[in-house]
Image (cartoon, helix red, strand yellow):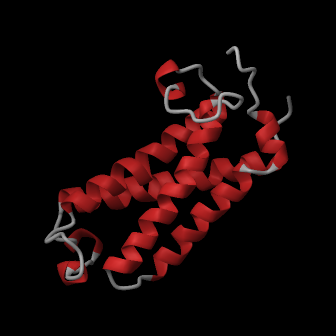
Amino acid sequence: MERPFSLYLLFVLHLFLGIGAVYGGGMLLIKPDGSGLGMDTEWLSHSPFNTYLIPAFILFTLIGLFPLLTFVGLLTKPDWKWANTLNLYANRHWAWTFSLYSGIIVITWITVQLIMTQYFWLQSIMIFTGLFIIIFTLTPAVMKNFETSITE
């Protein structure tokens, strides 16, 4: 089956999101005071955190590694039983479902950031990245590409 154009856009969005978050989360894990990225801990004053350590871990794993894992799944469609246990849609490959999860996770992440911290221009880019991940995941061509039989 030929891959639809919207799937290639999903590849790019997951790579963009994953690589950016692994970099940002990694830098904050190394320097939890935010100095490695020119961030101030004062930005956390309306959050439950004194440093960026816990947000960095969440950023690195859920917003970074998870979309990269999803990218691999979308690209190669591996039959990973452990990943399929987290799949809510029996008639779709787990990577399709994880793509939806990625979009939802990043939108939720940014929404919480907007509530707890001051606005930063990158938040707009990230929230639209999550929105476009959901939109492209839900295109009929991508949905068809990841259909599975329920017996698989």
The N terminus - image quarter: top right
Whether residue 99 sits left or right of residue 82 in the image: it is: right
Residue 120: image location, x then y, percent: 42, 82
- Residue at 73% over, 47% down: 8
Instruction: Identify the residue shown where x is 44% and y is 69%.
Output: 110
Residue 121 lies, with reference to residue 132, above or below; the image says below
Q: Quadrant of residue 33?
A: bottom left
Residue under the image location 54 percent in, 48 percent down = 101
Q: Quick check: 23 above or below 149?
A: below
- Can you see residue 15? no
**The one of 148 and 125 positioned closer to us in this rendering:** 148
Q: Residue at x 21, y 66 (%)?
A: 52
Picture mark count: 0
Q: Is residue 96 above or below residue 37?
A: above
Please identify the quadrant where the C terminus is shown.
top right
Residue 77, percent from left and from top: 64, 27
Horizontally, is 20 left or right of 103 in the view?
left
Quarter of the figure with residue 72? top right
Q: Is residue 146 visible?
A: yes
Spot occupied by residue 115 in the image (x, y as percentages of width and height)? 37, 79
